[in-house]
Amino acid sequence: MIKFTQQEAGFSSKVNEHFLNVKMKPLTYQLTKQLKKDLVIEGKEHNIVADTAVKLMQKLHQMYSGTIKFEDGSRMCFDLSKAEFIKEYFQGKKIGIYYKFIAELDALKQVFGEDLTTDLDEFNDTDKNIALQFISGREGISLKNADCLVAYNIDFSATTFFQFRDRLTTKERTENDLYWVFSENGIERKIYNAVSKKKNFTKSIFQKEYNLKLK
């Protein structure tokens, strides 16, 4: 086996990154503000508990994009703003959408309906868009038939960040467009600032960004 970098193999693709900000529903900002203040939100059927820095980081990561996974493992989409924005903004384009949490896939399916698939063969053979999870879809998958990549959220891992960016890359394709969909005043930009510099977004970075002293 002989290994080559993309440059050594003759690849010269350029990734053009675009940043799109979405204003979420007032409920999203109310809930995230309350959780940061009280570290718990008590509901009629479920509670959201963030009594450690790691839990708060994970919960805010979900909630700023409009979803939540409760303590019992059940999940909810309470704000479809991102999915609705993506459908409208990229209307007429064939796109590859990457999501972080399973509930985000639920939101995409709810908004896109039959225009969305999670199967690569179906994506290549039809006009449907495809949704893939960052971790499972970051390697060994080519989305060369997509017009562009769209990131519903962003992963904490720098490795995932750089591998995801190359899903459009082919030897013949010189320009790749990648769109980051961030919630206004959310956590995604803070994560991007870390992983784009080859640093994982860790608990210590999170605590520094939000001036927290939680364990």
Image: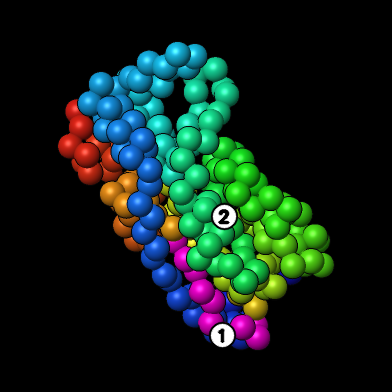
Residue appearing at x 33%, y 31% in the figure = 31
Residue 11 position by quadrant = bottom right
Amino acid found under the numbered disc labelled 2: Tyr
Q: Residues within 10 Å of mark 2 (few under 14, many from 20)?
A: many
Task: Tell me, yes or no, if residue 140 can be seen here.
Answer: no
Between residue 12 and residue 210, name the one nearer to us.
Answer: 210
210 within the magenta span: no
Amino acid found under the numbered disc labelled 1: Thr
Residue appearing at x 22%, y 39% in the figure = 210
Marks counted in the figure total 2
Extent of the magenta region: 171-180
Tell me which label, 2 or 1, sits earlier in the chain: 2
Task: Tell me, yes or no, if residue 96 can be seen here.
Answer: yes
Q: List the residue tagged with mark 1.
A: 174
Q: Is residue 211 above or below residue 173?
A: above
172 within the magenta span: yes
Magenta region, main secondary structure: strand
SS under mark 2: strand
Q: Is residue 162 above or below residue 176?
A: above
Q: Is residue 191 left or right of residue 163?
A: left
Q: Is residue 135 above or below residue 179?
A: above
Horizontal and vertical percent position of residue 192 = 36, 56
Q: List the residue tagged with mark 2.
A: 98
SS under mark 1: loop
Q: Is residue 39 left or right of residue 65?
A: left
Front tag of 2 and 1: 2
Horizontal and vertical percent position of residue 129 = 67, 61
Horizontal and vertical percent position of residue 214 = 24, 25
The quarter of the rendered structure image containing the N terminus is bottom right
